[in-house]
Amino acid sequence: MHVNTHAVTDCVIVINCGSSSLKFALLPMAGESIHLKGLAERLGTPEAVLHTEHDGIKRQNRIPHATHREALQAAAGMMEGLRPRAIGHRVVHGGERFTGAVRIDDEVMAAIGQCASLAPLHNPANLTGVKTARELFPDLPQVAVFDTAFHQTLPEKAWLYAIPRSYYEKLGVRRYGFHGTSHHYVALESARLLGKPLEQTNIITMHLGNGCSACAVRNGRSVDTTMGLTPSEGLVMGTRSGDVDPALHQFLQDQTGMRLSEITAVLNSQSGLLGISGLSNDMRTLADAARDGHQRARLAIDVFCYRLAKSVCGLMAALDTIDALVFTGGIGENSAGVRSLTIAQMKIYGVIIDETKNTSHGRNDRGVISSAESRIPCMVVPTNEELMIARETLRLIS
Ligand code: ADP
């Protein structure tokens, strides 16, 4: 038998570019596993480093002062045996222009640039990723997959802020929502696990990672979500406050003399779980500390779960019927404690958890963690944004 020792696997590269970081993953075009993935971080500094994982083997290479281009070049050097055929980019903000993924051309790049006023930290970084990838792989088709796109089906009553309409008309001030790729993927997976077509699936998905958002999915489409104009709105997150009184900025400015930008920075990076606990933004650390009697860690978890339960109950207004409450993201998939405490605060809806199923994260029960008597089933459905981006990329290039 002839054995081809030079077998190559055709792959899609998925890129998520931040201002000083570049995450990438290579997924085979035929299949769903990740062959090679990596994260280059602290780019542009002496501490720049590239972490990679190739077929399960982890490596770390120092790449002092590396730029995004050099980081991607270093990654490309590791792609032996893998043949990139297309590139899919995560792009944070697609405004009202992008209601789904698109092939990238000059005009699309300009439009992504125009959305930068809505995501000044993210969209320029995402564009850097696109430009770098175009330089290094000029022959490969590139696709943009937007975090906002899945939520473009929100009805106006859900996306309009109760402020003078001219701010929407002139500046695009409205609720957009984020984590759309994750909510969409999890909705598809939930439908599959429930044995229903997506178009007949009604669920509330909770993406709980460092950033957190929940989404009401009605007949397979997003009809409301907790994030708004920016990813700051809504739930309590790792370092973000989520909803606060709109008069808070003025109050803090009057009382402390802080500038608006400083107040925003506090609400974005020193608040949430970190702000309440004074200890950490990481749920694992807080869960361990709470177990050891750390009062503020306990309180941070309490506030997190209460606010989550309250928001989920609010999202019920967007649905007439519901098939499941679905947890995902690092916290949603792994913290039985957070799920249990959140569900315990929705008793009025007749939601009952099964602690045995919950402790094993629903893995033996098609994701289900609620008891047979629960009026609404509860599930854990792991998200996979890289896979969703790869699928969307393939759909658009074929
Ligand atoms: P990102 O939003 O950056 O993708 P993740 O989805 O990986 O983040 O979620 C990170 C969060 O998940 C952190 O708060 C982390 O502590 C939490 N997490 C991960 N594993 C566990 C676990 N076993 N128990 C509790 N929390 C966990």
Image: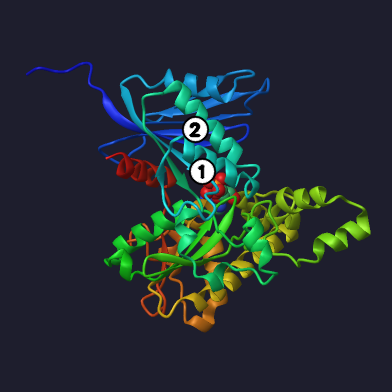
Q: Point out residue 270 in the picture as x, y percentages from the top left corner.
A: 75, 50
Residue 173 visible (yes or no): no
Give the left or right position of residue 169, taking residue 145 as reference: right
Cα distance between the residues tagged 2 and 1: 9 Å
Give the residue type at disc 2. Val
Q: Quadrant of residue 326?
A: bottom left
Q: Point out residue 315 in the picture as x, y percentages from the top left corner.
A: 53, 73
Give the left or right position of residue 23, taking residue 47 as reference: left
Give the residue at mark 1.
Answer: 91
Quadrant for the C terminus in the image: top left
Circle 1 Cα neighbour tier, 10 Å, few/some/many (<14 / 14–19 / ≥20): many
- Helix, strand or loop status at disc 2: helix
Task: Give the label on residue 319, or none.
Answer: none
Asked if the residue at tag 1 contacts the one at tag 2, i.e. Cβ–Cβ closer than 8 Å, the answer is yes
Q: Point out residue 245 in the picture as x, y percentages from the top left corner.
A: 76, 67
Q: Residue at x 54, y 46 (%)?
A: 92
Question: Eyeballing the image, is 397 above or below 344?
Answer: above
Circle 2 Cα neighbour tier, 10 Å, few/some/many (<14 / 14–19 / ≥20): many
Question: Eyeballing the image, is 397 above or below 336?
Answer: above
Q: Residue at x 51, y 78 (%)?
A: 317
Question: Eyeballing the image, is 8 above or below 373?
Answer: above
Give the left or right position of residue 48, taking residue 398 as reference: right
Quadrant for the N terminus in the image: top left
Mark 2 or 1, nearer chain start: 1
Task: Give the label on residue 130, or none.
Answer: 2
Residue 101 visible (yes or no): yes
- Helix, strand or loop status at disc 1: strand
Give the residue type at disc 1. Val
Q: Residue at x 74, y 59 (%)?
A: 296
Q: Residue at x 68, y 23 (%)?
A: 45
Q: Quadrant of residue 337?
A: bottom right
Whether ligand 1 has any atom under 8 Å from the Cβ at mark 2 is answered as no
